[in-house]
Image: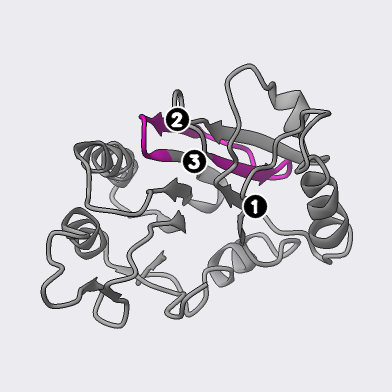
């Protein structure tokens, strides 16, 4: 999702301000565990080879959901060359988690993360291009109080940055798991109003536009 103050695609605003960059990348990792015993340890090297090394110019942000990382796994184990690593790990249950890689040429002004037993969020603000980028993971099922807290946390950063008089360009990536949504209307389908109430309010408040309207 991106705000309506930016242009047609989520990449364009960053591209105009930072010409050396290409599109924002979003991936569902289904585990990017670096453990030697993990069958997923090949994924980050593959991302580096196919997305970073072969992209010209490179993406400014790479967002990955369902990382399945744990606190004992260090940032050094999941680093990508020329990128800063931001993450939010699920503290207890298996699954979930978010990674946000920010290119080294973008100086991060502010960053924050949120994690509970179900939901994850990590965000950053880059003052040089007045851009806030976040990635979110919300599991399937009804909204939880934690998801409301996650959006409130994110909203507080947007409001604080906007106090300067100009709203930042906002890019919210992630997995929201709302199969019963009408993304053309940015609202739940009839009979499913309890699914997505908090997100619908967040979208309306920040003038966001859904960029991906088909199942992924």
Question: What is the x, y in percent for residue 25?
Answer: 63, 61
Q: Is residue 25 above or below residue 102?
A: below
Question: What is the x, y in percent for residue 113?
Answer: 44, 32
Quote the CA–CA distance across marks 3 and 2. 8 Å
Dot 3 falls on a residue whose secondary structure is loop
Dot 2 falls on a residue whose secondary structure is loop
The residue lying at 65 percent from left, 67 percent from top is 23
The residue carrying mark 1 is 62
Which range of residues does the magenta coloring cover? 98-120
* Nearer the camera: disc 2 or disc 1: 2
Instruction: Say which of 69 and 129 sits in front.
Output: 69
Residue 140 left/right relative to 16: left
Q: Quadrant of the N terminus?
A: bottom left
Quote the CA–CA distance across marks 2 and 1. 24 Å
The residue carrying mark 3 is 96
Instruction: Say which of 195 and 47 sits in front.
Output: 195
The residue carrying mark 2 is 93
Whichever of callouts 1 and 3 sits on the residue coming sooner in the sequence is 1
Residue 10 left/right relative to 69: left
Judge the density around disc 2: few (<14), some (14-19), many (≥20) Cα neighbours within 10 Å.
Answer: few
Residue that protrudes farthest toward the top in the picture? 72
Instruction: Say which of 213 and 126 sits in front.
Output: 213
For the residues labelled 1 and 3, say whether their Cβ atoms are less than 8 Å apart.
no
Magenta includes 182?
A: no
Q: Is residue 195 above or below residue 5?
A: above
Magenta includes 106?
A: yes
Question: What is the x, y in percent for residue 89?
Answer: 51, 30
Whichever of callouts 2 and 1 sits on the residue coming sooner in the sequence is 1
């Amino acid at each position: 999702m991106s705000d309506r103050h930016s242009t047609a695609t989520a990449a364009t605003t960053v591209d105009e301000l930072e010409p050396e960059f290409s599109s924002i990348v979003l991936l569902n990792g289904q585990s990017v565990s670096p453990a030697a015993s993990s069958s997923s340890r090949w994924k980050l090297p593959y991302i580096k080879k196919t997305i970073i090394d072969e992209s010209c110019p490179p993406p400014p942000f790479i967002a990955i959901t369902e990382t399945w990382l744990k606190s004992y796994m260090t940032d050094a184990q999941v680093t990508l060359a020329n990128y800063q690593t931001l993450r939010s790990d699920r503290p207890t249950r298996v699954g979930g988690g978010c990674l946000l890689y920010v290119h080294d040429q973008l100086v991060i002004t502010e960053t924050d993360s949120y994690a509970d037993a179900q939901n994850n969020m990590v965000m950053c603000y880059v003052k040089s291009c007045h851009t806030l980028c976040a990635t979110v993971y919300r599991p399937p099922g009804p909204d939880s109080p934690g998801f409301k807290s996650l959006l409130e946390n994110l909203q507080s950063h947007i409001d604080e940055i906007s106090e300067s008089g100009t709203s930042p360009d906002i890019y919210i990536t992630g997995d929201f798991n709302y199969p019963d949504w009408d993304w053309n209307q940015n609202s739940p389908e009839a009979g499913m109003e309890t699914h997505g109430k908090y997100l619908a309010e967040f979208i309306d408040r920040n003038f966001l536009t859904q960029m991906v309207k088909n199942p992924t």
